[in-house]
Amino acid sequence: MIMRSLVSLLLLYGFVHADTPKRPNVIFVLADDLGIGDVSPTNPDCKIQTPHLQKMADEGITFLDAHSSSAVCTPTRYGVLTGRYNWRSRLARGVLSGTSNHLIPAERATVAHLLKKAGYHTQMIGKWHLGWDWARVDKKEGKWQNIDFSKPVANGPDVNGFDRYYGHCGSLDMPPYVWVDTGKVTALPDRQEGVNRNEDPYGWYRKGPIGSDFHIDEVLPHLFDKSIAYVKERAKTKKPFFLYLPLPAPHTPIVPVPPYKGASKMNPYADFVMQMDGHMGELLEALKDAGVDDDTLVFFTSDNGCSPEGNFAKLKEFGHDPSAGYRGHKADVYEGGHRVPFVARWPNGIKAGQKTTALTCLTDLYDTMREITGQPKKDKAGEDSFSLLPAFKGKRSTTRKTLVSHSIGGSFSMRQGEWKLCLSAGSGGWSAPREGDAKKKKLPPMQLFNLKEDRGERKNLVGEKRPKADELILLLSKEVENGRSSPGKPVSNDRKVTFLPAGVEMPQGK
């Protein structure tokens, strides 16, 4: 009787959702440089075989209007873990290197902190690329030469809410190449290694120190082996776990191994995507073998669009487009830069076979898990995060109404409904026209597109629809100044944020 009354009170005050299953295990898989067109769930015309991801989609929900918060690696990872746009932090543009210091302060709320508080064991396995603090020695050489690999690493994922972590610091083409297991290098570098572009245009990686147990071709399967072992280990405890699995693939070095090498009959990039899909199948099968499949929420997505390193021209010969008809690619403010594949599967919590056009951002992981675990909202946590539970339950949309996207060069775009305003003269990234070229050609400093009528972002309507552009500028200005786009009290950004291109003034009414 007492227990029944307690549950009634919890339901009354919103701490338990009557229609939400018990806390699931959570696995968040983040591919690296995978385009929205590279997997069949988000591209019916995909020429790369991805049967395991297709099965995952068939058994879960596919988001067709999902976006990374940035068009490049580091800032998107910041957004995934914090539920906050990266440009509010000190990272105004670009990415970190393999020797960069940590980006996320220990006191900044993360989804790992959130789930740890809810009783989860939290583990990171893979590519961190958010910086950690190598032990330095007093030498004047730069980069890795002044790192003492025998000493502990400080301020790694463990200060950001992870009980344990195993991974490498930057992208797989960024030295140093060593595994770090919760602060300790597993094997000291015993050689210098690298491959230049002329030797292998797909499998190149920068020269640097490499550990005796670090083998570039084996990194992807090794990380999945580690992840499967983790799932088996945690399943025995009967306690919930959170596995954050940021992959190094299909980013360079593009190094598929048998039986996937040559399997696509297209190019190594397509082979590497097939290999990643195969490993996903192994991970999903491991959940079943461990008896935790029904109670595990698995996300699969990408940190940004496909990189030119995948060789768009070669793939086009086979009728394949990594951007699936959207303009641009990795680094760009155009859709190809940040519109990404996004699939979620949870047998006990998501009805199978769903597809949704709900506007979604990878920052939404934070509030989704906050709601699932029944924790209260906080002002300085998940400032740009909106729960995906309505979409999980079949609703046509979530409470997210806007989306701010960011390019490698720091250009902004503002999306509301079918309208998207790019605050750049060109791509803001790597595709033509780059910003310098666009300015030389005296292209307008802003671009306004109607994505419903022009998904390829080819017709700039800013001249015809300037009031709409002004409306979106004011909307962006409000979200910048409030320090948040989700409901809550205004909070401060970590730096002064500017977003208007040169020559554009704030509209009247501000």
Image (cartoon, grey):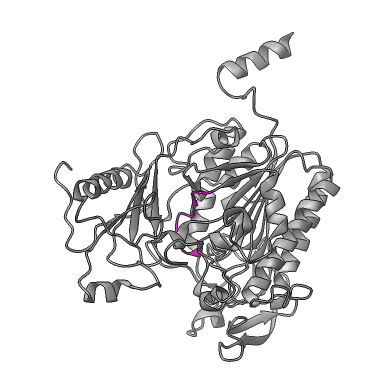
Stretch of the chain drawn in magenta: 64-73
Task: Residue 12 in the image: state x and y as whole percent.
Answer: 57, 16
Where the N terminus falls, by quadrant? top right
Can the viewer see residue 104?
A: no
Could you say which is closer to the camera, residue 226 or residue 256?
256
> What main secondary structure does the magenta stretch of the protein show?
loop
**463 left or right, relative to 409:** left
User: At 56% across and 91% down in the image, what residue appears?
Assistant: 198
**279 left or right, relative to 472:** right
**91 left or right, relative to 3:** left
Could you say which is closer to the camera, residue 1 or residue 36?
36
Residue 67 counted in the magenta span: yes
**443 left or right, relative to 325:** left
Q: Residue 335, relative to residue 161: is it above or below?
A: below
Q: Quadrant of residue 154?
A: bottom right
Can the viewer see residue 499?
A: yes
